[in-house]
Amino acid sequence: MALRLSSTYNTTIVIDGEVIPIKIARLNPQQAIDFNRDFARMGRANDSAKAPVPEGELGDARQAREQRAEEDERSAKTFVVEAISQYVAIEPGHIVEDDSPESITKGADLVRLFGARDAMLSELLMIIFMENKLDAEQKANWRTRLAPFVPTPVAVADRMMAIAKVTDTDTVVDLGCGSGRLCIAAAQRGATAIGYDIDADRIAEANEAARAAGVTDRCTFIQQDALTADLRSATVVSLYLLAGANAKLRPVLLSQLPAGARVVSHAFAMGGNWIADVSELVPLGEGEQLDHTGQRWVYLYSVDRWRKAHQG
């Protein structure tokens, strides 16, 4: 039986620079349990596949590991296709194939057209997860936000600052700062930290967290749309946003950031022609858990490099 797609769960995804309105199915409890279980399993499999080869691994052990990796990859691809095909629909008129007068309206067609774009498919899975996790108030505000609120694990926040080589000479601006974890990690390295978030509750949480960490003298939190933030004084910009939001920010970063600035992003790459100078899979600290297993990659970019490429 086909799922009913509720019009109250509208959101968007960016494809080739165009904002595409989509609808996400509202899963019943059992569907949500099954989806979250398979989503977490896929994340663990991806982490395992990208882990370094164990030293001294014997032939039989290597063969078994490679076989498991192939099976996990097949399983992950099946999960991606089935989930997007079942739970995603596209509003008519936004994608039309050249050889057909009909609009693409099904998730299965989206996979067929864009199946080689792993980042886009990953974002669709994340949107399915978030649309079925967030409460009603958060869902009502979804379209005005760059990303839902999911805290960055402490170990990941610390590593992001280390990879960006943040010191007491830096001004770190966190776009979509949430409860302030990235700003606090920067301030603990002596940097001046400024966080922007559109949600007043998140700003209140961030100020309280900074007080608890003893870094209020180095942290400032501003309730404001991150797309309108003033980045001219930033030497580092930190992000934990969806891929579509990163795409919206690319021209802002290129136009505003000063020479020598860096961008460090958790989980989602900047996309476009931006290739990370550093990409690293960061392990979680003891006892830490992510709401969405498998999203622990950190990407570092030199803005000078991509400003030059853009101008060229």
Image (spheres, rainbow, N blue to C red):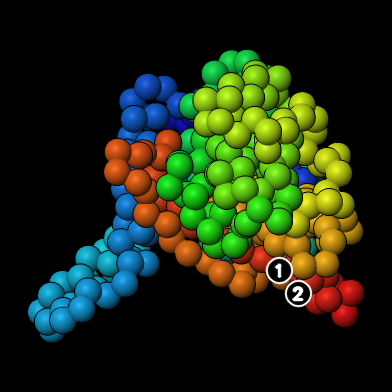
User: 257 and 2: which one is in front?
Assistant: 257
Count of numbered badges drawn on the protein: 2
Mark 1 and mark 2: Cα distance apart in space: 6 Å
Q: Element type at marker 1?
A: strand
In which image quadrant can residue 36 be found? Answer: top left
Q: Please give the name of the residue rendered at 58% of the width and 25% of the height, measured from the top-left corner.
A: 211
Residue 84 higher or lower than 49, as above or below: above
Q: Please give the name of the residue rendered at 70% of the width and 44% of the height, measured from the top-left corner.
A: 192
Residue 310 higher or lower than 283, as above or below: below
Circle 1 residues within 10 Å: few <14, some 14–19, many ≥20: many
Are the residues tagged 1 and 2 within 8 Å (C-beta)? yes
- The picture places residue 246, in percent across and down from the top left corner, at 70, 51
User: Left of 198 or right of it: where is 54?
Assistant: left
Q: Amino acid at mark 1?
A: Ser
Residue 66 higher or lower than 249, as above or below: below
Q: Amino acid at mark 2?
A: Arg
Position of the C terminus, as image quadrant, is: bottom right
The tag on residue 302 is 1
Q: Please give the name of the residue rendered at 39% of the width and 29% of the height, measured from the top-left corner.
A: 32
Residue that numbered label 2 is attached to? 305
Residue 18 seen in render: no
Circle 2 residues within 10 Å: few <14, some 14–19, many ≥20: some
- The picture places residue 91, in percent across and down from the top left corner, at 72, 37
Position of the N terminus, as image quadrant, is: top left
User: 107 and 264: which one is in front?
Assistant: 264
- The picture places residue 87, in percent across and down from the top left corner, at 51, 37
In which image quadrant can residue 88 be found? Answer: top right
